Image: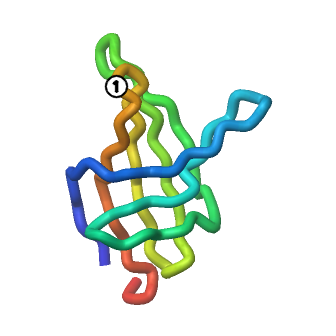
Amino acid sequence: MSEIIDEAVSVVTIYNKNGQVWPWKIKWNERIYNTIKIGFHQPLRQGRKLLHIFSVLTDSQTSFRLMLDTETLHWRLSEVVDESTS
């Protein structure tokens, strides 16, 4: 089951020495989700703003679509998919 969301979320992010970035832990609705797999990462330009879109699978079998705004460095949750009901 997929649900469209548009909420700010807290994300613990990992940056490696090669310049790659990964959302590692996500806090949403007072719950912490651990990322176990990155489905995809896609940079997206909206006007002059650069966003990074991530699809991640968590340890609770929930997938998140996240957006990182490179101007503000804020994360937004745009979609949640409960894999156990798909």
Q: Is residue 6 left or right of residue 43?
A: left
Q: Which residue does the image show at 49% across and 47% down from the upper left? A: 54
Q: Is residue 29 left or right of residue 86?
A: left
Q: Which residue does the image show at 39% across and 42% down from the upper left? A: 67
The vertical placement of 12 against 61, above or below, is above
Q: Residue 10 location in percent, x, y?
A: 37, 51
Q: What residue is shown with label 1?
A: 72
Q: Residue 47 location in percent, x, y?
A: 29, 14
Q: Quadrant of the C terminus?
A: bottom left
Q: Residue 81 location in percent, x, y?
A: 37, 71
Q: How many marks?
A: 1
Q: Residue furthest bottom?
A: 85
Q: Quadrant of the N terminus?
A: bottom left
The vertical placement of 34 against 43, above or below, is below
Question: What amino acid is found at the position of numbered circle 1 in the picture?
Answer: Thr
Picture quadrant of residue 20: top right
Q: Residue 80 location in percent, x, y?
A: 33, 66
Q: Which residue does the image show at 41% across and 37% down from the upper left? A: 68
- Residue sitting nearer the eye, 54 or 10: 10
Residue at disc 1, secondary structure: loop
Q: Residue furthest right?
A: 17
Q: Is residue 56 left or right of residue 30?
A: right
